[in-house]
Amino acid sequence: MSYVDEGDPSDEAVLMLHGNPTWSFFYRDLIRDLSPKIRCLAPDHIGMGLSQKPQDYDYSLATRIADIEALVVSLGLRRVHLVVHDWGGAIGFGLATRKPDLIGKITILNTAAFVSDKIPARIAICRWPVLGEAMVRGFNGFAGPATWMSMHNRKLSVAEKRGYLLPYRSWADRVAVNAFVQDIPLEADHRSRATLTGIEQALSRLSAHQKLIVWGGRDFCFNDHFLERWRKIFPDASVKRLADVGHYVLDDGGDAIRSQVTGFVVS
């Protein structure tokens, strides 16, 4: 597992967890803003970013959570403030519900950590047998389109697009991008359904933790339906909704979002 570790060494850190098809690059500007004030950790999930990309790994939600827990333990962290986005929500809350005493503040960016049958048709197609894998791995039909579908307020620059796509240049490189899509537990008998259900049922363990929800209102995937679920689960959370911001909230929202997150984490 590759990970970014910036800021003064400490047993307290901000743990930033990305989703699919991003990697720690998603948090580059937030790390720049926060690392002078607090240690920042941003791992690349196995198969993603600059981490190794084994073709026969157990790419399941349970394994993802165990991977992050192993990283936290190996670094001797005693206090972790979470920032989660996309699949990072289920993974991060998987860790947090297991170890609530480890967790400090929680920042939620367009994500979910509960069962839902809401899925855009364009993602559902990527789950189709044979055709889905051919699209995602053969034609980069997930990571590629995400560079424009995930933005609304502005376009990513050529350099930013290149950064997002850098780790995913071949069929083998895209193994975990496809695995993340296949691991969406829509079906009742899906192998990750019980894991996600268990996380959802345990979210109440985190009721007393300080939370900030920063939400892009033009997200094609994690839309306002998911925001309303979060409001019901954590009614005391502070909510900042930006109406014209897409799924890549830190890129599309820019300074407005990063200042909200930075101020919350270090206050």
Image (cartoon, grey):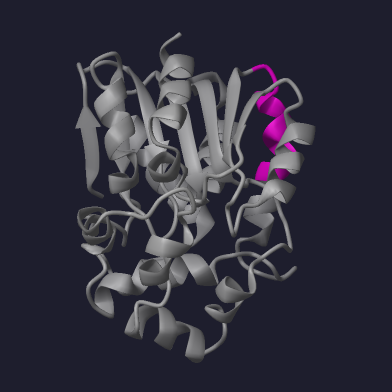
Q: Which residues are magenta?
A: 199-208
Q: Position of residue 136 (x, y in %)?
A: 41, 78
Q: Is residue 141 magenta?
A: no
- Position of 78 relative to 233 (above/below): above
Q: Quadrant of residue 204 in the image? A: top right
Q: Is residue 105 left or right of residue 224?
A: left
Q: Position of residue 134 (x, y in %)?
A: 41, 88
Q: Which of the pair 132/195 is nearer the observer?
A: 132
- Position of 148 relative to 223 (above/below): below
Outermost residue on the top side: it is 267
Q: Is residue 54 left or right of residue 111?
A: left
- Residue under the image location 35 percent in, 31 percent down: 73
- Position of 105 relative to 96 (above/below): above
- Residue under the image location 52 percent in, 29 percent down: 107
Number of callouts:
0
**Residue 114 seen in this snapshot:** yes
Q: Position of residue 97 (x, y in %)?
A: 60, 33
Q: Which of the pair 165/101 is nearer the observer?
A: 165
Q: Is residue 218 left or right of residue 253?
A: right
Magenta stretch secondary structure, dominant: helix
Q: Position of residue 156 (x, y in %)?
A: 33, 54
Q: Which of the pair 224/99 is nearer the observer?
A: 224
- Position of 203 relative to 219 (above/below): above
**Residue 69 seen in this snapshot:** no
- Residue under the image location 58 percent in, 25 percent down: 212
Q: Is residue 202 magenta?
A: yes
Outermost residue on the right side: it is 232
- Residue under the image location 59 percent in, 59 percent down: 220
Q: Which of the pair 125/2 is nearer the observer?
A: 125
